[in-house]
């Protein structure tokens, strides 16, 4: 019961969607941006997916709490889904339905309830900020908190294609030394993102070279620095590459999550349409003097 009460206190009440006229007024006050209508539609989709998740979590916690308080039923009034949720919480695991509603980037099953609720609160705050600032003024995005991060990348590619309609555009990721807490404005080109993790490895701060030392964080991962994502052609990437060091470059794919989810588990969230294990983009890392092949 204490777990449910604490969780409900942290979760708060479900929110109502911003009015269309409010969004229109905000857009008119902002710098004009060609992707603003599509961006606003995507963020409203993120809003509704998040509120569906918040409602499901809140309903489960309330049902479990009321069942524990009712000494006559002793939990017999719980639905099969809430019974499963209670069993998972007792075993210090996240309920499977919550993970499905989160999307492809859901935390692992053994993630703590406190961490899950904290991330959910941060997810709502990011959506609120994006709706208020719009595409032109949003400084950076936590990809790990988005249900549909692939849509953001699609908008970035569409924006670049509108300026330069060359064929073969792809996402280029450059590691930045900027502290995400101090970023107040978006880059002049592309977007800033964070929330990515490097598994089974770590980076040297400043040079961002791969190190042989194991990651210090528990679980075998290292938080990645802020990345600036831009769009570039295959030809431009090839010209910008240093031939002398190209053999030391590791093209590291970025996935929704390192935990594979079956396709059937994704249908309820309706978050993405990509097949399993399709990378969002790649980050090029290098180790001085160590060939990647």
Image (cartoon, rainbow, N blue to C red):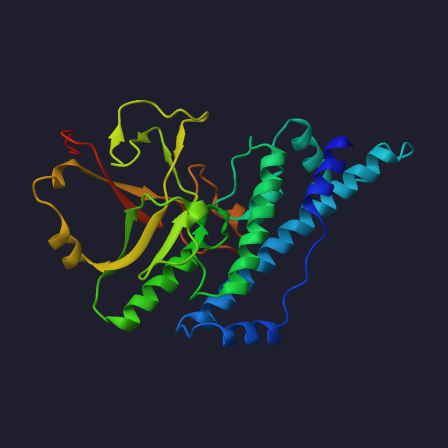
* Residue 124 versus residue 87 in the image, above or below: below
Which residue is at a point 55% across and 34% down the rendered structure image? Answer: 109
Residue 240, image x, y percentages: 14, 52
Which residue is at a point 55% across and 76% down the rendered structure image? Answer: 24
In the picture, measured across the screen, residue 285 lies left or right of residue 143, that is left
Say if residue 57 shows up in the picture.
Answer: yes
Residue at the extreme left of the image, as rendered: 244
In the picture, measured across the screen, residue 157 lies left or right of residue 111, that is left
Residue 266, image x, y percentages: 52, 49
In the picture, measured across the screen, residue 29 lies left or right of residue 120, that is left
Q: Choose between 81 and 154: the one closer to the eye.
A: 154
In the picture, measured across the screen, residue 285 lies left or right of residue 274, that is left
Which residue is at a point 62% across and 35% down the rendered structure image? Answer: 114
Which residue is at a point 8% across and 44% down the rendered structure image? Answer: 243
Which quadrant of the rendered structure holds the C terminus? top left
The answer to which image quadrant residue 22 occupies is bottom right
The answer to which image quadrant residue 154 occupies is bottom left
* Residue 23 versus residue 253 in the image, above or below: below
Residue 151, image x, y percentages: 42, 59
* Residue 112 versus residue 179 in the image, above or below: above
Residue at the extreme top of the image, as rendered: 213
Number of residue marks? 0
């Amino acid at each position: 019961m204490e777990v449910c009460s604490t969780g409900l206190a942290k979760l708060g009440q479900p929110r109502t969607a911003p009015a269309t006229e409010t969004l229109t007024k905000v857009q008119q006050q902002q710098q004009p941006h060609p992707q603003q209508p599509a961006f606003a539609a995507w963020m409203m989709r993120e809003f509704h997916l998040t509120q569906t998740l918040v409602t499901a979590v809140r309903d489960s916690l309330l049902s479990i709490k009321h069942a524990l308080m009712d000494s006559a039923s002793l939990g017999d009034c719980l639905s099969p889904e809430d019974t499963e949720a209670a069993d998972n919480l007792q075993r210090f695991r996240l309920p499977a339905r919550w993970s499905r509603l989160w999307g492809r980037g859901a935390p692992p099953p053994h993630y703590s309830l406190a961490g899950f609720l904290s991330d959910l609160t941060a997810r709502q705050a990011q959506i609120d900020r994006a709706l208020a600032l719009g595409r032109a003024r949003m400084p950076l995005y936590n990809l790990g908190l988005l249900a549909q991060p692939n849509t953001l990348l699609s908008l970035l590619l569409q924006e670049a294609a509108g300026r330069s309609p060359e064929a073969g555009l792809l996402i280029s990721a450059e590691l930045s030394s900027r502290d995400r807490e101090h970023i107040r404005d978006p880059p002049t080109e592309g977007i800033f993102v964070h929330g990515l993790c490097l598994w089974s490895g770590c980076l040297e701060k400043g040079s961002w070279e791969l190190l042989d030392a194991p990651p210090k964080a528990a679980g075998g991962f290292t938080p990645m620095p802020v990345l600036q994502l831009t769009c570039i052609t295959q030809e431009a990437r090839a010209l910008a590459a240093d031939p002398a060091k190209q053999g030391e470059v590791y093209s590291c794919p970025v996935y929704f999550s390192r935990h594979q989810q079956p396709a059937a588990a994704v249908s309820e969230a309706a978050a993405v349409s990509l097949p399993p294990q399709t990378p969002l983009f790649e980050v090029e890392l290098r180790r001085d003097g160590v060939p990647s092949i």
